[in-house]
Amino acid sequence: MERLVLHEYAASGNCYKVRLTAALVGQPLERREYDILKGETRTPEFLASVNPNGRIPVLQAGDRFIPESNAACFYLGDGSRLVPDDRFERADMLRWMFFEQYNHEPNVATLRFWIAFVGEDKLSDVERAQMPGKRAAGEAALKLMDEHLRGRDWLVGDRLSLADVALYAYTHVAEEGGFRLAGYPAVSAWLGRVADRPGYLPMAA
Ligand SMILES: N[C@@H](CCC(=O)N[C@@H](CS)C(=O)NCC(=O)O)C(=O)O
């Protein structure tokens, strides 16, 4: 098996989605933890040798580095049952992964980070002013997923794909950011299906 290192912060959903993909395909990962609250991904050494964008996750394969969670998931999942064979479904999988990064993560994950990790009292005025907009956009993303998942088991096609993994990561902890998942029954049922898959790995593992 290829030796892979995940540079990460374990409580981050972006990092968890890479670990979950690795677990689902049976790929072991070495893990290297950075405290993002202490700026450990912003040191000159990290910027020079791991990711010039100053963020985790970064998947390391030999002396090459793959930043961006969904790119790392694709590296791990490529050629497995997590990536559909059908050309349309592969594109549809990417559509949900881009949706995750543009409509879901910047809202659902950022509110979780601000509320559960930074603390509302420590937010800047600019951040606090962004909260209502992020709340509305996060609810819109969850509503869109809920409508799509009514009458479907998986986001794409008829089995679990990287689209489900990418969106599972921050959706299953959305309540830590003040979202109420009970208001999204199709999403809640889908979360249960993902957690029932063989090879599933909980975030805290
Ligand atoms: N689009 C990137 C987002 C990465 C990201 O925002 N990482 C956060 C943690 S979830 C981080 O490293 N924050 C530390 C910092 O910005 O200094 C991905 O999907 O990997």
Image (cartoon, rainbow, N blue to C red):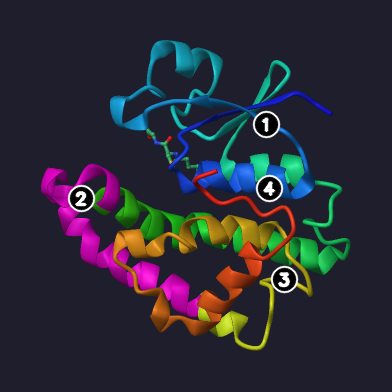
Q: Earlier in the sequence, mark 2 or mark 3?
A: 2
Q: Earlier in the sequence, mark 4 or mark 2?
A: 4
Q: What residue type is disc 3 on?
A: Val
What residue is shown at x 38% (from left), y 67% (from top)? Answer: 138
Q: Earlier in the sequence, mark 3 or mark 1?
A: 1
Q: What residue type is disc 2 on?
A: Glu
Q: Earlier in the sequence, mark 1 or mark 4?
A: 4
Marks 1 and 4 sit apart, C-alpha to C-alpha, by 11 Å
Q: Quadrant of the C terminus?
A: top right
Q: Are marks 4 and 2 in contact (CB under 8 Å)?
A: no
Q: Is residue 170 above or below residue 140?
A: above
Question: Disc 3 designates what residue?
Answer: 156
Q: Where, by quadrant of the figure, is residue 83 drawn?
A: bottom right
Which mark is drawn over residue 21? 4
Q: What residue type is disc 4 on?
A: Thr
Which mark is drawn over residue 29? 1
Of all residues, the one furthest to the top in this rendering is 45
For the residue pair 159 and 68, the one nearer the viewer reads as: 159
Marks 4 and 3 sit apart, C-alpha to C-alpha, by 16 Å
Residue 160 position in % (x across, y down): 73, 65
Q: Are marks 1 and 2 in contact (CB under 8 Å)?
A: no
**Residues shaded magenta:** 116-144
Task: Determine whether, in the image, residue 13 is placed left or right of residue 192.
Answer: left
Marks 2 and 3 sit apart, C-alpha to C-alpha, by 34 Å
What residue is shown at x 30% (from left), y 31% (from top)? Answer: 37
Q: Is mark 4 within 8 Å of ligand 1?
A: no
Marks 1 and 2 sit apart, C-alpha to C-alpha, by 35 Å
Question: Disc 2 designates what residue?
Answer: 127
